[in-house]
Amino acid sequence: MRSTLRPALGIVAALTVAASTLVGFDVALADTPTPTSAATATAAPAATASPSATPTDTASAPASDSPSAAPSASASAEPTDDASATADAPADSSLAADPSLSVQDAEGNHTMGSTIAENEPSEPNAPGASTSPTSSLRVQSKAVTTSSVSGASKTSIMGLDVSAYQPTVNFATQYKNGARFAYIKATENTTYKSDTFAKQYAGAATAGLLRGAYHFAHPDASAAAQARYFVANGGGWSADGKTLPPLLDIEYGGAKGECWGLSQAAMVSWISTFSSTMKSLTGRAPAIYAGYYWWKDCTGNSKAFGANALMVPSYDRDLSQGPVGIGASWSDWTIWQYSSTGPFAGDSDVFNGTMNELKGLALPSSLATLLSSPNGYVDSVTTVPGGIRVRGWAIDPDTYKSIKVHVYTGSKVTVVTANKSRPDVATQMPKWGAAHGYDVTIGTAKGSYKTCVYGINAGAKGANALLTSCSTAKSLGTNPVGSFDKAVATTTTSVTASGWAIDGSTAASIKVAVYVDGAHKTAVASTTRTDVGTTYGAYGSAHGYSVTVPAAQGTHKVCVYGINVGTGPNSRIGSCKTVVVNYKPVGVVDRITPSKGAVTVSGWAYDPDVKTKSIPVAVYLDGRGVRTTASTSRADVAKAHPGIGTKHGFTKKLSASKGSHKVCVYAIDPSGHGSNPTLKCSTVTVP
């Protein structure tokens, strides 16, 4: 069984273990149910300095309580920006240059942008511009920047990307020269992993650079397998504020042509599979490195990847111009690889934004807020004696102390401290300990209530947080409730009322009183009703009743009351019902005789409730009825039923055409409240 701790594990781990990610925690506890995971970026509350979560069904949000002293998770401090750093800083002279593309092809190790210079046209009028290649896939004259593409400047945030072909990068020097971020090659296809990646990745972090890993794609092989290989060999993502999203480097190559032998639709599908696999494995969608022309040629200028950050190569252009163009998925570029020849090691890059925005690329503000906001779980919201019981746990990553929780039931808010012992929390998060559980019963009137639980933020950062989704719970209140079943059984001398009854304040069986007019009988509602036990589990099943009260012939009003076990009033259970206590009419059809043009019916009938009176009889011929009165003399009937007299016989002749006919005879209850029994139905043939 998976633990209800799972929604918070990625968050806490990201604060305490820099290499961990927001996803992938899968721990088992013996006695906690599996929740729907809440630790996703889409569920994160908006980041504000001291926000309050606002329940939709209340006029005001739970107020932020005073923050407790919070042990902040340690992390490498970001260096302050060097205002003098520019793109004109000298490159590290000890670095090796990339080998030729043919060598990279032979080694199966390609650097980011290795195929761009031979396939993407340069700005024709730029100093030192390369000659545009011959290609059947594009028009070469692209001197003017496409619309809606930002430029950069020498004071923009600079960075670099390197591979194993630069094995001795001095990242401290790169930082001194103005670099603030780096992408480092980790893998290619499922056949190559860089033996310098770990050293370079750690070196960049030690020097104070934000860093990320990139994968050189081979779209003619499995996208999902390459994503898994990338993650397994350094291409993960950690919510530590210094790891850039994983980067998919997809460009020209392959034996089957510039687009790897794939159609545009197949290429879009390949990228989508790689992206979704990466997100499922790391919690972040990868950034995409793709040239403007490649994107148009090989994806049909797809608009499907706006959620992925864009890194675009475009060389031999002034920084103020910006790249020559970007694919239709994006409104602007995020990182521009503007040079493969310096000033930085490997390739030189520029970020389209401020340093704070670059940090936001590493750790989006929604996730930063989430990481500092309370987290926990609502184990159960149940109907119990006395009201609604709410159980769960809550922590704030910024403090080891117990925090407050606000429980909303409708418009009512109940404030509790989550300090009950939860050993399962302590097992998974030992630094926080066990004192983080809450278990509260909220007294309410009878009704249904939307129930929401908020963890109250305890630190300077973060926000009050909804702990899993709201739910609707019923309360039985503190007075008797129940049901008076629709059917009321009667005999010639009694009335029987059945149903169930519970007093909302106790699970014990309670008394009910069944009234028939002014007379009543009291009994304990303790028979088994499994349907009640299923619906109201905390109360059990021993709440059924079936009470018989003597009643004379005639019409009666029947009402049921639950007897309050406390100081409140007795409560009527359901609606009162009107019933009639009487005998059914009885009788016999002696003969149904067909003759030419007619059918004759004869017999006798009487009602035991009015023994000596003659009663109506209805005779139906093919669905058309006529009434007669059973009033002719029948001495044989009087002899067989002493005390009723002789006036109970009937004979009725009905016209009928030649052929087959259905004849039915009914005795009619003269009171109008009882049933009209069928005396006989028969099919006859008229000659």
Image: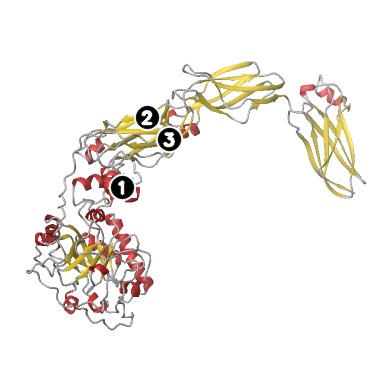
- Residue 414: give its label: 2
Between marks 3 and 2 in the image, the one whose residue lies nearer the viewer: 3
- Left or right: 513 in relation to 183: right
Disc sitting over residue 59 in the figure = 3
| Colour scheme shown | secondary structure
The answer to which image quadrant residue 672 occupies is top right
Helix, strand or loop at mark 2? strand
297 w.r.t. 152: above or below: below
**580 or 5, nearer to the observer:** 5
Amino acid type for the residue under numbered disc 1: Ala
Which is more foreground, mark 1 or mark 3?
3
Callout 1: 10 Å neighbours few (<14), some, many (20+)? many
**Residue 118 location (% of width, % of height):** 23, 79
Quadrant location of the N terminus?
top left
Q: Position of residue 52 (x, y in %)?
A: 34, 39
- x, y (%) of residue 197? 15, 63
Instruction: Identify the residue under disc 1.
Output: 39
Give me the residue at 50% from left, 30% from top.
Answer: 529
Q: Amino acid at mark 3?
A: Ala
Q: Secondary structure at mark 1?
A: loop
- Horizontal side, residue 447 vs residue 268: left or right: right
Q: In the image, 188: left or right of 514?
A: left
User: Label 2 is placed on what type of residue?
Assistant: Thr
Q: Do tag 2 and tag 1 residues touch (Cβ < 8 Å)?
A: no
**Label 1 vs 3, first from the N-terminus:** 1
In the image, 58 versus 283, the foreground residue is 58
Q: Is residue 183 visible?
A: no
Relative to 15, is 515 above or below?
above
Upstream in sequence: badge 3 or badge 2: 3
Q: CA distance from mark 2 to mark 1?
A: 25 Å
Relative height, residue 350 to residue 499 (above, below): below
